[in-house]
Amino acid sequence: MDTFVKFSNQSQGRDRIFRATQYACALLKYLLRNNAEKKKLLTKLQMLRLGNTVSAIETAKRTIHLADPVLNLCLTMANINRALYFLCDNVLWARSLGLIRDIDTERWSRNASRFYFATLVLNLTRDVYEISQLVAQRARDKNTQERMRQHLNDNHQVAEVIVPQLDAFLFLLQESFRANPAVALDTLKNICDLFIPMNHLGIYKTNGGVVGFCGLMSSLLGIVTLLHPSLKIKP
């Protein structure tokens, strides 16, 4: 209980809880066709997001000083796009409350989805870069090389079916994720999130059930990383 109270007192923690609840309701809406509760929770979620634009800008100001050029570019651009996404999101929220009237809500909504999609693509690019670095490190490690040879020898029939090089890569990938679960969780979270803007933008049309399920899974993974900071990818 103390852990939950400490977690819920964090602004990010509250955001994750309401986001998880929102997408759980979206999934239930698809299953039960009930929209009233989702609207109430969405309004609460928007209130919690008001400070996220500033937070994303501050994060971008830090990541622009990273020495690694790939991480520098991906994380800085991702946070800039994230800030623009929250800006559009807040404008739409203000419009829903009647604080702003003369705006094209469909245009702002699509722009928000574009910025969100760009953020996730950049985050996934960073994940792929991190994975490639980890796999390369594992491939040079003598202990890992020995285990990989043993694995290929013990599973030579499987290796013959799926190509030895692919089997070796999958082994190294598994070893990398096992040693660095934060990268695996971040990749999975970003993949789940990606279905949300792709559906809105028409890149990959799905239904409310899939969007709700993916959003719920992403939110739960986000909660896990906040409860266990060691599982949060760095920087």
Image (tube, rainbow, N blue to C red):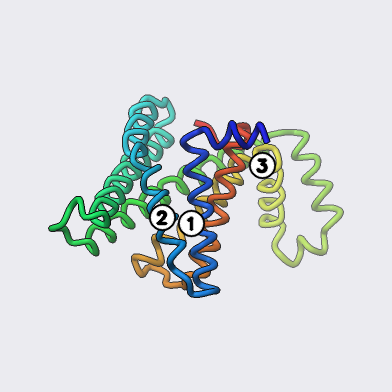
Mark 2 secondary-structure assignment: helix
Left or right: 168, with 203 as reference point:
right
Residue that numbered label 2 is attached to = 42
Give neighbour class at mark 2: few <14, some 14-19, many 20+ (Cα, 10 Å): some
Mark 1 secondary-structure assignment: helix
Q: Nearer the viewer, mark 3 or mark 1?
A: 1
233 shown above or below 99? above
Horizontal and vertical percent position of residue 70: 42, 37
Q: Which mark is residue 22?
A: 1
2 or 192: nearer the viewer: 2
The disc, 3 or 1, on the residue closer to the chain's N-terminal end is 1
Q: Amino acid at mark 1?
A: Gln
Q: What residue is drawn where x is 55% and y is 56%?
A: 216
Q: What residue is drawn where x is 58% and y is 47%?
A: 221
Residue that numbered label 3 is attached to = 176
Horizontal and vertical percent position of residue 58: 34, 29
135 shown above or below 193? above
Q: What residue is drawn where x is 52% and y is 70%?
A: 209
Give neighbour class at mark 1: few <14, some 14-19, many 20+ (Cα, 10 Å): many
223 or 192: nearer the viewer: 223
- Asked whether the beta carbons under mark 2 and mark 1 sit within 8 Å of each other, the answer is yes
Mark 3 secondary-structure assignment: helix
Q: Amino acid at mark 2?
A: Leu
Q: CA distance from mark 3 to mark 1?
A: 33 Å
Q: CA distance from mark 2 to mark 3?
A: 38 Å
